[in-house]
């Protein structure tokens, strides 16, 4: 049983395409103040179909096929307007560069933008949620800890989830016999469809025989690992529920994946590196004109299996940050005027493509940490060293998902949060996930979301 269904992404895709088509028809009707004929509509739908494919790609990069969390829904109007403005701009460029279709829809594109934005918003906010079944699956949560409490609050407060917890047993507060008693009670209820349990909790183990027997009395039943459900909800690993065996099991990967990933790293570094060389002279000149300091810096970082590596970057600060911050826990160096823009556009990272070619870095992986900070975090954060079971990367799951990544200072709580994303990637890494991370990184660079 999949408690967090994936079919909603397919429904969103189909619905968006239909809205594109309807918006085009309405824009034509408004443009000419009459219902467009079949032949006239087909004349436009053929070139616009090519655009629809590109527009879906823009929606993907804008995150519109990600999870519709509460925060995301709050930002949805601005995201749709931003994405559709880009789509209309692409359409204008398309018809200007490819005039073979015999149409120059300047006014039509403006009308399309005005029509499509409210329609897409209405589809996603009002129509799409109504397509979900109103009857929710009822389950029982048997676990404890801060991550479990966060998960139960998230599920209870957001109607997008097609399930709910009819009963929650906190194993920190309940005694073993109370857990068994509660399991017996809910197992007998016909409305209970699933159990979510922490398999590492001793109190849970005592209740598993009752849960096992209840599975034979129900037409629909599932036993779900609390860690797995937490990952589906938050896209990160619950550190409070982790055990060493889970971390080590996630470190295993196929030889085929490792070889293919290396091929992608080399190919990507060569292609991007060739184009990057075009901007090197301009970056070097800007840095020199700014403060006359050195153009490049090299930094010691911790690589795979905690092997020391040195990476090269364009200098974006008044000096070279080595991670030694003293009692303040923060660097005294300042970001330069040019460095601010280099960071916003991630240009300061381009020289590290050389490190990718040498095999010290990958295109995708955990962020390479400074040795001084790594030693501090390893001593205070459980499982932190697991990040070094794979190559660090230029970009990664934590970099695109964790907006409060600590930079140029030591921050234990935020580093724990970042680690939860790194461990999620460690367990679920694949070429498809790597591609998704790269595409989302492109979106971040285009939108100039600073680092």
Image: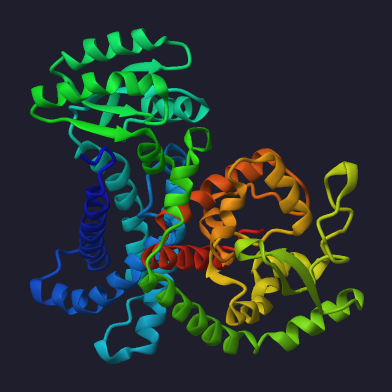
Residue in view at x 52 percent, y 26 percent: 146
Residue in view at x 74 percent, y 88 percent: 281
92, above or below 28, in the image: below
Quarter in which the C terminus is drawn: bottom right
Q: Which of 132/185 is in front? A: 185
45, above or below 166, in the image: below
249, above or below 227, in the image: below
Q: Which of 437/258 is in front? A: 258
Residue 407 appears left or right of 273: right
Residue 13 appears left or right of 148: left
- Quarter assignment of residue 205: top left
444, above or below 166, in the image: below
- Residue 154 percent location from the top left of the image: 42, 30
- Residue 372 percent location from the top left of the image: 79, 54
- Residue 224 percent location from the top left of the image: 29, 34
Q: Which of 33/425 is in front? A: 425
């Amino acid at each position: 049983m999949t408690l967090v269904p994936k079919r909603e992404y397919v429904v969103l895709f189909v619905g968006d395409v239909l809205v594109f088509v309807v918006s085009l028809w309405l824009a034509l009707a408004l443009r000419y103040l009459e219902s467009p004929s079949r032949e006239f509509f087909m004349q436009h739908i053929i070139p616009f179909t090519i655009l629809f494919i590109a527009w879906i790609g823009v929606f993907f990069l804008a995150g519109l096929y990600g999870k519709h969390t509460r925060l995301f829904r709050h930002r949805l109007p601005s995201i749709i307007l931003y994405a559709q403005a880009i789509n209309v701009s692409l359409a204008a460029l398309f018809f200007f560069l490819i005039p073979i279709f015999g149409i120059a829809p300047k006014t039509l594109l403006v009308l399309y933008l005005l029509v499509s934005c409210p329609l897409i918003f209405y589809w996603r906010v009002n129509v799409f949620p109504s397509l979900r079944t109103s009857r929710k699956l009822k389950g029982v949560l048997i676990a404890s800890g801060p991550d479990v409490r966060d998960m139960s609050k998230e599920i209870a407060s957001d109607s997008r989830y097609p399930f709910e917890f009819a009963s929650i047993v906190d194993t920190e507060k309940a005694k073993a016999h109370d857990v068994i008693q509660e399991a017996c009670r809910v197992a007998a209820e016909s409305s209970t469809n699933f159990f979510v349990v922490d398999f590492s909790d001793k109190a849970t183990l005592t209740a598993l025989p009752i849960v096992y027997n209840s599975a034979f009395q129900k037409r629909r039943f599932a036993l779900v690992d609390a860690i797995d459900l937490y990952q589906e909800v938050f896209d990160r690993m619950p550190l409070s529920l982790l055990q060493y065996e889970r971390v080590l099991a996630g470190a295993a990967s196929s030889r085929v994946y490792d070889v293919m990933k290396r091929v992608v790293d080399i190919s990507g570094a060569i292609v991007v590196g060739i184009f990057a060389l075009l901007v090197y002279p301009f970056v070097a000149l800007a840095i020199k004109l700014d403060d006359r300091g050195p153009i490049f810096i090299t930094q010691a970082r911790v690589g795979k299996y905690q092997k020391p590596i040195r990476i090269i970057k364009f200098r974006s600060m008044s000096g070279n940050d080595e991670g030694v911050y003293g009692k303040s826990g923060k660097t005294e160096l300042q970001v330069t005027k040019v460095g601010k823009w280099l960071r916003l556009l991630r240009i300061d990272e381009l020289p590290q493509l050389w490190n990718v070619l040498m095999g010290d870095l990958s295109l995708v992986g955990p962020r390479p940490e400074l040795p001084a900070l790594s030693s501090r975090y390893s001593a205070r954060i459980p499982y932190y060293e697991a990040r070094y079971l794979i190559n660090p990367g230029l970009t990664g799951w934590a970099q695109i998902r964790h907006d409060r990544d600590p930079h140029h200072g030591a921050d234990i709580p935020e580093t724990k949060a970042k680690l939860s994303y790194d461990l999620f990637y460690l367990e679920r890494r694949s070429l498809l996930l790597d591609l998704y991370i790269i595409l989302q990184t492109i979106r971040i660079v285009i939108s100039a979301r600073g680092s």
